[in-house]
Image (cartoon, rainbow, N blue to C red):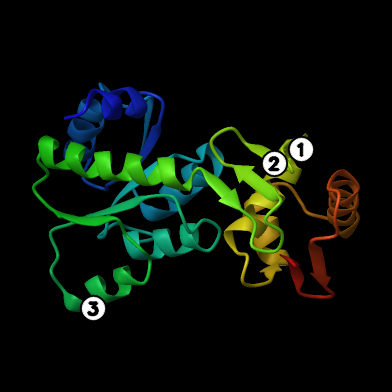
């Protein structure tokens, strides 16, 4: 195993969703020796709440969990983030689950029982993918570059300073460059438990438009926003 991978993993966080507490604790404790942080969730809904709050770098998820199963959980993640590496863990071989999961762009399937060496080898591939995906060049204007790792927006190498909500808003639009991001999605992914009022959203967009040098934010009235 490469030393570079171990060093890189020490700076990354992992979300591990598994409803069997014994398995979850053993794997989480083992991964804790390698990763910066390991967040644990016992069901898909809890996992999604942790994902929204902590924004982990890598997601490990079992399929069969209460409230939200692993497939439903990752569908919610993929609605706002197409690039976070996801590893699905299951003892299930049902083709319907496998076909459904393919559409969610999993990095790999791992069949229980988990073997730490195999899991670390899979995480090594995830880390390599993260390093490739850290920097996003905007499709609408290639002079804009967003660095997910540093949380920096650049225009022609000039740094544009964003506050937390502006950053979240921009990240959601970047992750969904080919479609409109609805008001409901902005409420969930940018405001979270806070109430998104019309005036608060308009104020955020107005301030963001003042900061960026070109007009790349489009509003479809009554629906949402996208990059153009």
> Badge 3 local density, few (<14 within 10 Å), some, or many (20+)?
few
- How far is disc 3 from disc 1 in space, using C-alphas? 42 Å
Q: Is residue 203 above or below residue 104?
A: above
Answer yes or no: do the residues labelled 3 and 1 have beta carbons within 8 Å? no
Mark 2 or mark 1: name the one nearer the start of the chain. 2
- How far is disc 2 from disc 3 in space, using C-alphas? 40 Å
Tell me the quarter of the image containing the N terminus. Answer: top left
Label 1: element kind: loop
Q: Which residue is mark 1?
A: 162
Label 3: element kind: helix
**Res. 187 mark:** none
**Res. 153 mark:** 2
- How far is disc 2 from disc 1 in space, using C-alphas? 8 Å
> Badge 2 local density, few (<14 within 10 Å), some, or many (20+)?
many
- The percent position of residue 70, horizontal first and vertical second, equals 33, 59
Q: Which residue is mark 3?
A: 96
Q: Is residue 192 above or below residue 25?
A: below
| Residue 65 makes an appearance in the image | yes
Residue 124, picture quadrant? top left
Mark 2 or mark 3: name the one nearer the start of the chain. 3
Q: Marks 3 and 1: which is nearer the front?
A: 1
């Amino acid at each position: 195993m490469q030393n570079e991978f171990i060093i890189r993993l020490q700076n990354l966080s992992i979300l591990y969703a598994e409803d069997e507490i014994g398995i979850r604790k053993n794997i989480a404790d083992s991964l804790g020796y390698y990763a910066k942080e390991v967040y644990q969730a016992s069901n898909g809904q809890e996992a999604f709440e942790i994902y929204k709050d902590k924004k982990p770098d890598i997601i490990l998820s079992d399929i069969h969990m209460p409230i939200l199963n692993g497939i439903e959980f990752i569908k919610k993640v993929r609605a706002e983030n197409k690039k976070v590496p996801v590893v699905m863990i299951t003892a299930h071989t049902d083709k319907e689950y496998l076909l459904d999961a393919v559409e969610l762009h999993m990095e790999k399937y791992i069949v229980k029982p988990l073997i730490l060496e195999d899991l670390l080898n899979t995480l090594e591939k995830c880390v390599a993918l993260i390093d490739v995906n850290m920097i996003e060049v905007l499709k609408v204007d290639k002079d804009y570059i967003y660095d997910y790792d540093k949380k920096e927006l650049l225009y022609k190498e000039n740094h544009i300073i964003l506050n937390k909500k502006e950053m979240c808003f921009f990240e959601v639009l970047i992750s969904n460059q080919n479609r409109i991001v609805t008001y409901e999605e902005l409420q969930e992914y940018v405001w979270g438990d806070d109430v998104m009022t019309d005036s608060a959203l308009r104020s955020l967009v107005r301030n963001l438009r003042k900061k960026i040098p070109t007009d790349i934010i489009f509003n479809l009235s009554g629906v949402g926003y996208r990059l153009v």
